[in-house]
Amino acid sequence: MKIAVTTMGQDLDAQVDPRFGRAQGFIVFDTDTGDWQLIPNSVNLNAAQGAGIQTAQMISESGAKAVLTGHCGPKAYRVLNAAGVKIYAGASGTVSEAVDAFKSGKLTASTGPDVEGHW
Amino acid sequence: MKIAIASGKGGTGKTTVSTNLARILSGKQQVQYLDCDVEEPNAHLFLHPRITDRYDACTLIPQIEEAVCDNCGKCSEFCYFNAIATLANTTLVFPELCHSCGGCLRVCPVNAMTEVRRPIGVIESGTADGIEFVHGRLNIGEAISLPLIRQVIDHAKPDRVVIMDAPPGTACPVVGTLQGADIAVLVAEPTAFGLHDLTLAIDLIREIAIPCGVFINRSDIGDDRVERFCAENDIPIWGRLPHDRRIAEAYSSGILAVDAIPEVAASFDGLAKGLLEGGNV
C-alpha cells in the first residue's frame, strides 16, 4: 500500500511538514516494498488559493491510499475523502518515524478536518 | 460623475468624508450614495436611509451533471482559482472559490456543466433625505466580495453625482471600486502610518489612471509629512478636517458632523466645490 507523507525535505530523514495543502513536498512510500519517491509540491505551495484542493487531487493521482500529515483543512479533507484516501493528521518527527508510527498502528485515521482553512 | 472615497488605511475617515460630502452636495445636486464596503457597510448608520428595496445578489457557479461528466479533468485544469477537483470517479466543485468566469463550461467537451445562481449577499436601496442610497451586505463566510461590489456599482445612475464609499486597503475590492469611478478622494491622516498607506493608495490610483486628490482627516494631529508628500508629488489637497471631540461624539451617535457642528461644513464645501469643478480646488 502506498502512503503519502508531507515533508519539508528530500528524504526519509526529513521532518514531516505540518501543513498539507502547502507542504513543501510529499514522500510517497510503499509499505510493501519500502520503495519511496519524492513528489515536489512547488506549484500548489504557491497557489493563490485552493492549494489543499489541488494537492489532494495530486495525492489521489499518485495512487496513495493514505496521507500522513500534521493538519488537514476542510477542503482538502473533502477531496481526499471523496477520493477514498485516508487522512492521518497529527503525524510528526521525521518521515520514517511517521511511517513507523503508521505501520505500528499508532496513528488514528481522521474522521474530519482538524483545522479551519488557512490555519 | 462618480466619486470614489478611498484610503490605503482603514479607519482614516472614508465614511465620515463620504457621508458628510453627500449631505453637502445634496443641497445642490441629485446625489446617489453607494456604500461599496460590502464586508462592513456602515454609511447607513449616519445617513439613516429608509430601505424600500431588498434582493439577493447572486453569482453564477458551475453545477456538474454527474451522469454526463466523464471526469476528464479539463475543467479543473482550466480553473485558475483551483475551485474544481477531478478524481478518478468524481469531480468536485468548491463554490466559495469560484470567480464565475464560466471557463469550465466552455472547456467541458461533453457539456456536463450548467451555471446555477448562488446567493452571496443582499443589496438594499432606499432614500435618505433626498439622497438615493444603495449598499450591499456580503453574507457571513463569503471570501470574495468583488462580485457584490460590482452589482452595487451597477446601480450608479449616469445623471447623478455618485458618491462611492470604497472598502479599505489597496486589494481587489478597492481596485474594483476605483475602476468604476471617474475621480477619487483619498482620505489620509497626517501620521507616519497615514503617509505609508497613502503612498500605496497613490500607486494604485496611478495604475488605474483617474484623477485624485487628498482629504486630510484630523489635520491638526501628527506632522506635515502628508502635506509635504502631496506638494512634492503634485497631488492636490482638497480639504482638511481638524481633530475635534465633537465630531467623534456626533459620530458615535450616528449624527453627521456637518449637521452637528456648523463650522465643519467649510471643510466639505471646499471639497465639494473642487470636485464639481473637475478636481481643481
Image (cartoon, coloured by chain):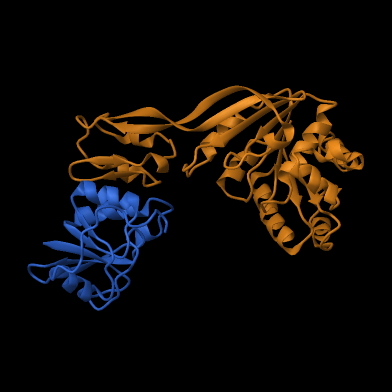
Chain colours: A blue, B orange
Q: Is residue A36 left or right of residue A9?
A: left
* Nearer-the-camera pick, A87 or B187: A87
Q: Residue furthest top?
A: B52
State the residue at coordinates (57%, 29%).
Answer: B123
Q: Quadrant of the N terminus of chain B?
A: top right
Expressed as whole percent of the image width and height from the top left, the position of residue A107 reads 20, 66
Up-down: is B101 above or below B226? above
* Nearer-the-camera pick, B167 or B105: B167
Expressed as whole percent of the image width and height from the top left, the position of residue B150 reads 57, 34
Tell me the quarter of the picture where residue B44 sits: top right
State the residue at coordinates (39%, 46%).
Answer: B80
Tell me the quarter of the picture where residue B50 sits: top right
State the residue at coordinates (35%, 58%).
Answer: A43
Q: Residue furthest left?
A: A32
Q: Quadrant of the C terminus of chain B?
A: top right
Up-down: is A58 above or below B17? below
Tell me the quarter of the picture where residue B131 sits: top right
Expressed as whole percent of the image width and height from the top left, the position of residue B241 reads 84, 48
- Whether residue B106 is visible, yes or no, is no
- Whether residue B12 is visible, yes or no, is yes
Expressed as whole percent of the image width and height from the top left, the position of residue B105 reads 34, 32
Q: Is residue B139 left or right of residue B50?
A: left
- Count of residue discs: 0
